[in-house]
Image (cartoon, rainbow, N blue to C red):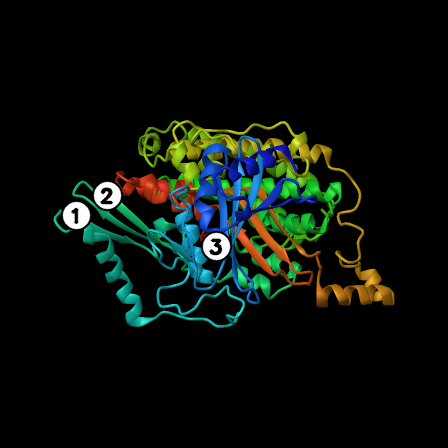
Amino acid sequence: MDAFYATIIDDLKKIVPAEFLQFEERTQFTSEQTLIVDKEKIIEVMSCLHDNHGFHFLMDLCGVDWPERAQRFDVVYHLLCPKLKKRLRIKCSVGEKEFIPSIHSVWKVANWLEREAWDMYGIQFAGHPDMRRILTHHEFVGHPMRKDYPADQNQAMRGEALENTFDRDRQRLMSKYDHEDLMWINIGPAHPATHGTLRFMSVIDGGERIREMDVEIGYLHRCFEKMCETHNYNQIIPYTDRLNYCSSPMNNSAFCETIEKLIGIKVPPRAQMMRMIIDELSRIMDHFVCIGTNLVDLGAITAFFYLFEEREDIYTLFESLCGARLTVSLMRIGGMGFDVPEGWLENCSTVVDKIEKRHQEVENLVTTNRIFVQRTKGSGILPKDLAVQHGYTGPCLRATGFEYDIRKEEPYWFYDQVDFDVPVGTHGDTYDRYLVRMEEVRQSIKIIRWCLKNMPGGPINVPDKNIVLPSKKDVYGNIEGLMNHFMLIIKGVQPPVGEIYHRSEAANGELGFYVISDGTGNPYRVKCRAPSFSILSGFPAMVHGNFLADAVAALGSINIIAGELDR
């Protein structure tokens, strides 16, 4: 056992009897060990890990349904110790009518994560302050992620029930302010300032400062994780496109890398370099969308057109590579769907040069603009400690001064060979989030140029007929190729029995996939750790005491994408 984890076990045994703990040592994935804990001791264990061992981040929490077991559900927690770059998975077994203690007192983000686990599985958390549905509507019957819930059974909320929702929420928020002269403001779910189908309910005072805010999500929920269970692994790739659709290739690469790690393969160097280029182009595109639309919210429309022109240039690059622009499905498990055509790398270099020039123009136009600075500096502040409590990652975390970038701290592909910087802010306000994203664009340009200069030759897929489809020449030219193609299409890639959590540095932060394989062509469980979910959970704290108009600016700066938020 690793000395770090051995120390943890010894420390936990001082406060929890040994029979309540079971450590599963992983020889294949040493960076993610699993600790099985009795549910009655979960608060003591989590408090010890948080306070004494540096596991300051609750990255994700999810349920898993095992209908044949007496204790039907697993509650799975994924923790991160950023100082030592260590991960730990905690598991608790819970019966169908049993309660597990809530850990929202240890991590604030657990509030939303536990609500999701109850909504999807019916797992009950004792002591939770606000156990309501979060992704499905309040009229929904049942829990859709259970194995016995039919995947094709939809439940719509219409008419009077929908109208009653607004009255109920108003009464819930205003009831504690009966004797004060306050106003209830509803924004959304269809409002241009929300950048998606979101609903914000605010209690504001006479000076239009926010006293309390609640967020309602789930309007774009299509149960991505349930769909994963009814499709084979390669069929899931197009569904990942619809998560963060502003940078869809990053979702492809993160999911494919997860399954490749579970299988135990590494894609060829050329495929890795292609993924780096495409991911960094996607990062630039995502940041430009965020900055451009945020400026429109503030009434500055010129830079929006500048930035979206460069976004279209990147789309044109993607189109020449695979024929699609928005949802590209570029990656495959085991490599790439397409190699770069002749002249593509040169065109990419030309586009990057143009992006750099336009980026500088926008920076000159916006960064020191007096109106923009006055609207964004000092508003929408979320301190570093609260950002960590809410599981913030990516630019929103780094804007608070917390330097953590997976490409640097837990490098994958060739990121450890590239000389690039990780920009951080100081105050965690709307202005710092803008600055961090602008500087990240500059660093992405540097990474892309390094990749273009060092692009290796060779294949783009692993030479394994059980993973990669044969060429059309083999399919039409010999019976072995035809049979190979048939089996992969019908049965799909079949990873070994096991589980894995893999993450990458997406445009909004840590994009992670927790996958459980039962050895068949379809995953037993897929949980997507989308950065927007944790980030939005901290938004009410971010805008508390701010003007309502400044909350609109803050919302644009955190770049909530409804596709990955609601899944």
Front in this rendered view, residue 371 or 180: 180
The residue beneath circle 3 is 563
Mark whose residue sits in front, 2 or 3: 2
| Disc 3 element | helix
Residue at the (71%, 63%) spot, across then down: 492
The residue beneath circle 1 is 182
10 Å neighbourhood of mark 3: few (<14), some, or many (≥20)?
Answer: many
- Numbered-mark total: 3
What's under tag 1, amino acid-wise?
Answer: Leu
Q: Position of residue 384 (x, y in %)?
A: 41, 32
User: Does residue 298 appear in this view?
Assistant: no
| Tags 1 and 2 touching, CB below 8 Å | yes
Residue at the (64%, 63%) spot, across then down: 522
Front in this rendered view, residue 31 or 369: 31
Q: Where residue 1 is drawn, which disc sits there?
A: none
Q: Earlier in the sequence, mark 1 or mark 2?
A: 1
Does 390 sit above or below residue 330?
Answer: above
Mark whose residue sits in front, 3 or 1: 1
Q: Position of residue 329 (x, y in %)?
A: 62, 55
